[in-house]
Image (spheres, coloured by chain):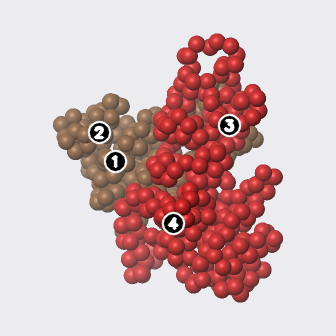
Amino acid sequence: MSTTDRRVRETFVELADTLVDDYDVLGFLDLLAHRVVELIDVDACGVVLIDHHGTLNLVAASSEETRMLELSQLQNSEGPCLDTFGTGRRVSMVDLVAGGDERWPRFAPAARGAGFAAVYALPMRLRDAVLGAMNLFGREPGPLADESLALGQALADVATIGILHERTARQHEVVAGQLQSALDSRILVEQAKGVLAERLSISVDDAFALLRGHARSTNSKLRDVAAAVVDGTITDVRRT
Amino acid sequence: MARICGEERSKWRADRWVRLSAEHRADHVWGAIVERARAEGTDPSLRHVLHACAAAVGAAGCGLSMVGATGAREPVLAVGEYCDELEELQFTLGQGPGVDAAAGDGVVLVPDLAAGSAVRRWPVFAPAATDRGVRGLFAFPVAAGAARVGVLDVYRRDPGALDAVRLATALAFADAVLVVVLDESGGIAGGPDHRRDAILPERLAEVHQAAGMVSVQLGVEVSEALVRLRAYAYVHERRLADVAAEVVARRLRFAPDRRGTDDTAIGSEMMDAPPNSDQDRPEGGA
C-alpha cells in the first residue's frame, strides 16, 4: 500500500470518527477542506452551500479565507460552483488562461488574480438535489488524474453526509433545518472573527486562525467558541 | 439505505427547481409585502410582513415574538384567528415550538400538533392548539448568528409538512422580518427599494465580520451593530456591502456617541482623515 493510500484510509477513518452524536459540523468541514488539499493535487479547497435565497455561501476553506470568500461570492453570478449546481455534474476548467474568460468573464480573471490556473467544482448531491459544491483550485494548469477526481468526489459525498447526518436526513424539512443550522453557524463565526479582529487589532484571517486553534486545543466546537467570543465569555483566545 | 418513496423524490425535484429560481425569491417576498402596504397607503410594517407571509405559505396566521428591552422574550404581534392567543399561551406555559426555536433549537417544524410526539413534547400547549383548530406550527428563528432577535411562528389549520417551496418562502420571510426589525430599531422608515436590495447582502460574510468589529467599537451587541451599519448605509445612501467592506478594511470606524443621545452612529470617517481634536478621534470600544 502506498503512502497516499494509507493516508486516504486514515483520513476516512478520522472523518468517520468525528461523525459522532452532536458533532461540530463546521469543524468537520474545515478538517475535510484541509485533508482534500493534502490528498489531492490541488492548492485550495472551499466548501460552498446554497441557502433558501439561492445564494452560495462558503462554509469552510482550506486556506486564505478572505480570498476564498471573494471567489465564492463572485460565483453567485457565474463560475464553476454555479454551473455544477445547475447541472448536478462536475465542472472542470483545467486551464483558466486558455478557456476561462470565455466561459466566466468575471470569475476567471479573479481566480487568476488569486494565483490559480485550474479550477474544479464537485457537486454535493443528495439524491436528485444539489446542496452545494466542493470547489478545488490548482496553481498549475493541467487536468487532475481520474483517480484524484474520484477521490475528490468521495470526499464531497462525505461532506454531504457530514452536513445532513445521513441517517436522519430522509425528509426535505430535516435537510432544510440542518442546512440552515450550518449556514447560521457560519454567520456566527464571521461575527466572532470581526469581534476578535477588532479586539486584538489583527486581520480577520488571523482571527479565524485563532478561533480554530482555540477550538482544537480545547476540543470545543467552532460554533461554541465563536458564540463565547461574541458574548464575551471567552476573552483570552491565543494560539496555543 | 432505505428506498426513497415516489413522493419524496418529487419533493426533491421541486426543491431543486425552487432553489434554482430562488434568486428571485427576495423580490417576490418584498413584492407581496409592499403590495399590502400600498393597499393601505402606508409604509411596510411588520404587520404587512406577517400577513404576506401567512398568505404566501397557506397559513391561518403568523405570530412574532421578540426579545424586549427587559431582555425577556415576549409576543409582539400576531395576525390570524387564535394566533395571538396561542402566542400568549406558549409564553405563559413556557412550552411550544416557538419557545424551543427561541431556546436555540433552530427551525422547529411540527406538521401535526395532534401527533403523539408533539403531545409528549408540549403536553399542555399541543392539545390547546389542536382544540382551537390549529394542527401545524412552524417556528423560524429571526436571527443571523449571534443577532437573535425573535421567532416567527407560522400556524396552519390542516396537518401536513410545509412543502419545499413554502418552507423556503417562510425562511425568506423570516429574513424579511429580521431586516424590518433592524431598520425599525435604527429609525429607518425606509422604502421597500432600499430593503429589497438589502436582503441578500445580509448573507454576506463581510457584513457579519463588520458587525462583529462594530460591536466591539461601540461596546454593543451584534444585533445593535447590525442596526448601526444598516442605518449608516441608509443615511449615506451607500450599499451595506460597501460600508461593511470599509469597516473590515479599517477605513471606517464607528465611535460611541459621547452625548449619549443616540442617532446616526456616525463614526469618524476615514482613518487617514486629519485627526484634529479628540472629538473625531476613533476609539476602541470598551
In the depicted structure, whether residue A236 falls above or below residue A6: above
User: Mark 1 belongs to which subunit?
Assistant: A
As shown in the figure, which amino acid type bears the numbered disc 4? Ala
Query: Which residue is label 3 attached to?
Result: B263
Q: Position of residue B21 (x, y in %)?
A: 36, 62
User: Mark 2 belongs to which subunit?
Assistant: A
Mark 3 and mark 2: Cα distance apart in space: 39 Å
Of the chain colours in the picture, the one used for chain A is brown
Query: Which residue is label 1 attached to?
Result: A77
Q: From the viewer's perspective, is the residue at label 3 or at label 4 nearer? A: 4
Disc with the residue nearer the chain's start (1 vs 2)? 1
Pointer 1 and pointer 2 on the same chain: yes
Mark 1 and mark 2: Cα distance apart in space: 9 Å
Q: Counting other residues with Cα less than 10 Å from the Cα at mark 1, is it few (<14), some (14-19), or many (20 or more)?
A: few
Mark 1 and mark 3: Cα distance apart in space: 36 Å
As shown in the figure, which amino acid type bears the numbered disc 2? Arg
Label at residue B129: none
Residue closer to the observer: A11 or B105: B105
Q: Position of residue B33 (x, y in %)?
A: 51, 62
Regarding mark 2 in the picture, which secondary structure is present there? loop
Q: Position of residue A126 (x, y in %)?
A: 41, 65
User: Mark 4 belongs to which subunit?
Assistant: B
Q: Which chain is red?
A: B
In the depicted structure, whether residue A109 falls above or below residue B222: above
Label at residue A106: 2
Mark 1–mark 3 contact, CB under 8 Å?
no
Regarding mark 4 in the picture, which secondary structure is present there? helix
Query: Which residue is label 4 attached to?
Result: B39
